[in-house]
Amino acid sequence: MLYSHVTPSDKRAALRARLAAGELLQLPGAFNPLSARLIEDKGFDGVYVSGAVISADLGLPDIGLTTLTEVATRAGQIARMTDLPAIVDADTGFGEPMNVARTVQTLEDAGVAGCHIEDQVNPKRCGHLDGKATVDLETATKRIRAAVDARRDPNFLVMARTDVRASVEGPTGLRVAIDRAKALVDAGADAIFPEAMRDLAEFEAVASAVDVPVLANMTEFGKSELFTRDQLAAVGVQIVIYPVTLLRSAMGAAERTLDMIRETGTQDGAVGEMQTRARLYELVDYAGYNHFDTEIFTYRP
């Protein structure tokens, strides 16, 4: 009932242990706390909180318009509703290195298990769009050093995302991305998120070059193919995120239902595809709250 009984520190320790064991972990993106409950119920390994999803949920494009407060608040609402570890997209850290440090401590307080900081110029853009610009290597490593130095829980996972692959065409782009990944690991990054890899060979090249877990972004309509879990595990990837998948699925269904109501005057034809009331009550633990009302709130000695 209410929130998770697993503490944030225990979630972080569990995430670290599974990564150290060499497991591949799948983290679908939660667009709200209830979807995080669903992700856990379906047996996934963790929950991802996407910056693009938070922006879209506010009706905004993913161009750096959200604030630390908005991201931390939403991430905290999601993280506290599941026993799974939650990883959040912290964009560029919301400012200069001191802001990055504050971001990490704020996200620790929100109860998430880790975050990733990227090397784009602020304001940033969606990682799978053209026209991105990245900061110089010194600035990128300063962000990661600030994040690592600021954390109070050593198990809080600081991941470094690099977008340089898409900034340089051809094989040179991959070499630059690998060199930057190595430098970010030297700066203290616990994992590397190489954005917009073109194929499995590129993921494998990055994973072979660093001795920390590598994250693969399996977002739809992006620059990477939608590889399977087994394909990614075979090339050394350990974390797979599906950042916008649930939001896109939910919004697609919502749009179809609205169209149906406009065209037919009723939603009746869509009811069969909806989550039932019983299933919703199961996810929100309606029975647990009823038990509280019956056994505690209304208790009379």
Image (cartoon, rainbow, N blue to C red):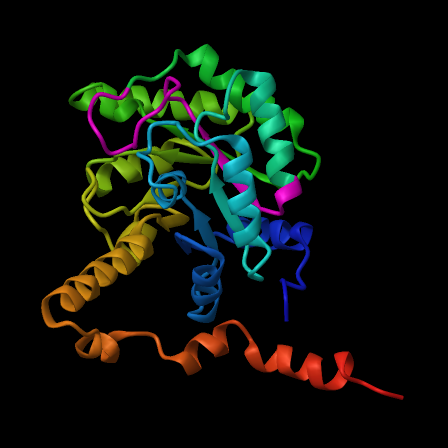
The image shows residue 10 at horizontal and vertical percentages of 67, 55
The residue nearer to you, when weighing 175 against 103, is 103
Relative to 272, say whether 129 is above or below.
above
Question: Residue lying farthest bottom?
Answer: 301
Is 166 on the left or on the right of 214, as rendered? Answer: left
The image shows residue 232 at horizontal and vertical percentages of 30, 50
> Where on the picture, by quarter, is residue 271?
bottom left
> Where on the picture, by quarter, is residue 59?
top left
Is 286 on the left or on the right of 58, as rendered? Answer: right
Is 227 on the left or on the right of 237, as rendered? Answer: left
Magenta stretch: includes residue 276? no
Is 206 on the left or on the right of 191, as rendered? Answer: left
Q: At x 26% / y 59%, what residue is drawn?
A: 249
Q: At x 11% / y 72%, what residue is drawn?
A: 264
The image shows residue 28 at horizontal and vertical percentages of 38, 55
The image shows residue 150 at horizontal and vertical percentages of 66, 27
Question: Residue lying farthest right?
Answer: 301
Q: At x 49% / y 65%, what residue is drawn?
A: 37
Relative to 85, say whether 268 is above or below.
below
Screen quadrant of the N terminus: bottom right
The residue nearer to you, when weighing 91 against 194, is 91
* Figure label count: 0
Viewer can see residue 155? no
The residue nearer to you, when weighing 224 against 132, is 132
| Magenta stretch secondary structure, dominant | loop
Relative to 121, say whether 79 is above or below.
below
Screen quadrant of the C terminus: bottom right
Viewer can see residue 48? yes
**Magenta stretch in the rendered image:** 109-132
The residue nearer to you, when weighing 249 against 143, is 249
Q: At x 25% / y 61%, what residue is drawn?
A: 254
